[in-house]
Image: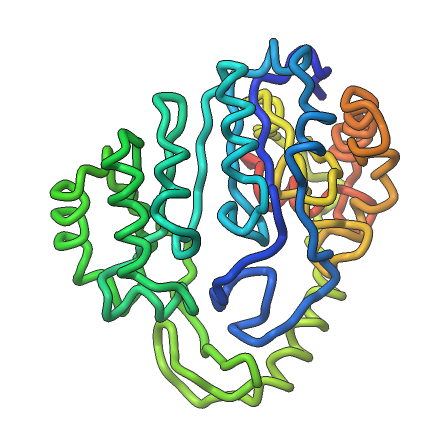
């Protein structure tokens, strides 16, 4: 694994807080209010200045703000943190649902060094079927204000069965508004029932069918996460790992200050009920950059690479590494 001097990019989740209720997000369960172990927390400007000092930033080229759980716009000091990093000549990428804050706040983020991806999954009549509790019109207003101030914006479109027919119209609108690009981000999220915060059925994403009670769905979800293993035969050849941490020379800084090789391993493994945490948790040592020097927080990464030689998930191969980055 890489040393701090070799790192060129930092992926930061500034906050675990989010205004949206996307059904397939880890922060809830199909729209239900459900927390499987993550803390509600955020990194402040003071925290970022403590972790990413000007000396450390001399070898960093890029910072990416994109949350596993939270949205950038919910971070109290988000704009000030961006300004601090831009002053250090760092390029910034931000992904957000864009549905909060005032137009003036988004205008403050406009800089040649900053690019913002706005999640816009369709038009006004379809967008919130997945991006629940967000306001399509307000997102467009915020994006337009940012663009008008000189900001670079990307329209990020996740296709579903209910919005695929609108892609061409969305692309045309993005061009008309001055977005620099349009990204179709297909990731297989097009399936399953959606429930209200109280657990009542709301609507379907993808094919429809009989609606299972949320209690049964949730129990199945918990049981699946508790028992999930991917067994690999002992005579299986060595893994062909294309480790993103090593390829991109990037580390992941979570909203509680903990540091991981990448966001796939950064689901708060000491507390959050997520596949692979049972294998990962024993490896994590002294990785909170609010309490230890950043270079020290990277030392445990070596145990990840050593674990790739294990013969199976059950024997300690990291689940996320195998399922995400194994080229075999």
Residue 262 coordinates in the image, percent (x, y): 63, 35
Give me the residue at 38% from left, 65% from top.
190
Residue 278 coordinates in the image, percent (x, y): 81, 53
Q: Which residue is nearer to you in this view: 268 or 53? A: 53
Viewed as shown, does residue 30 lie left or right of 241? left
Give me the residue at 63% from left, 52% from top.
16
Q: Which residue is nearer to you in this view: 286 or 186? A: 286
Viewed as shown, does residue 276 lie left or right of 87? right
Give me the residue at 60% from left, 56% from top.
17
> Could you say which quadrant of the image residue 95 lies in?
top left
Q: Which residue is nearer to you in this view: 68 or 224? A: 68
Marks counted in the figure total 0
Q: Which colour style is shown?
A: rainbow
Question: Can you say whether 113 is above or below 286 in the image?
Answer: above
User: Quick one: quadrant of the N terminus?
Assistant: top right
Residue 317 coordinates in the image, percent (x, y): 76, 42
> Could you say which quadrant of the image residue 38 lies in?
bottom right
Residue 161 coordinates in the image, percent (x, y): 28, 67
Question: Can you say whether 125 is above or below 155 in the image?
Answer: below
Q: Which residue is nearer to you in this view: 147 or 215? A: 147
Give me the residue at 80% from left, 56% from top.
271
Question: Can you say whether 259 is above or below 270 in the image?
Answer: above
Viewed as shown, does residue 321 lie left or right of 83? right
> Could you say which quadrant of the image residue 54 lies in?
top right
User: Quick one: quadrant of the C terminus?
Assistant: top right
């Amino acid at each position: 694994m890489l040393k701090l001097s070799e790192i060129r990019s930092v992926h930061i989740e500034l906050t675990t807080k989010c205004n949206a209720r996307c059904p397939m997000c880890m922060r809830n369960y199909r729209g239900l209010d459900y927390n499987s172990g993550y803390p509600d927390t955020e990194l402040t400007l003071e925290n970022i200045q403590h972790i990413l000092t000007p000396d450390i930033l001399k070898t960093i080229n890029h910072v990416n703000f994109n949350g596993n759980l939270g949205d950038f716009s919910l971070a109290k000091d988000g704009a000030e943190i961006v300004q601090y990093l831009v002053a250090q000549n760092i390029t910034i990428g931000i992904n957000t649902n864009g549905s909060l804050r005032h137009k003036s706040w988004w205008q403050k983020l406009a800089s040649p060094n900053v690019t913002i991806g706005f999640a816009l999954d369709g038009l006004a009549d379809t967008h919130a079927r997945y991006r629940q509790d967000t306001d399509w019109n307000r997102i467009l207003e915020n994006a337009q204000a940012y663009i008008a101030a000189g900001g670079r914006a990307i329209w990020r479109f996740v296709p579903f069965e209910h919005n695929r027919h609108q892609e061409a119209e969305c692309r045309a609108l993005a061009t008309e508004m001055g977005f620099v690009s349009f990204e179709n981000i297909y990731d297989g999220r097009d399936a399953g029932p959606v429930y209200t915060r109280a657990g009542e059925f709301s609507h379907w994403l993808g094919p429809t069918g009989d609606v299972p009670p949320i209690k049964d769905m949730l129990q199945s979800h918990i049981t699946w996460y508790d028992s999930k293993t991917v067994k690999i035969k002992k005579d299986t050849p060595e893994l062909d790992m294309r480790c993103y941490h090593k390829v991109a020379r990037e580390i992941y800084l979570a909203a509680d200050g903990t540091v991981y090789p990448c966001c796939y391993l950064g689901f708060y493994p000491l507390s959050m009920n997520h596949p692979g945490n049972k294998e990962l948790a024993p490896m994590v040592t002294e990785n909170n950059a609010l309490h230890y020097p950043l270079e020290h927080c990277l030392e445990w990464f070596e145990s990840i690479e050593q674990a790739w030689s294990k013969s199976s998930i059950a024997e300690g191969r990291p689940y996320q590494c195998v399922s995400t980055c194994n080229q075999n």
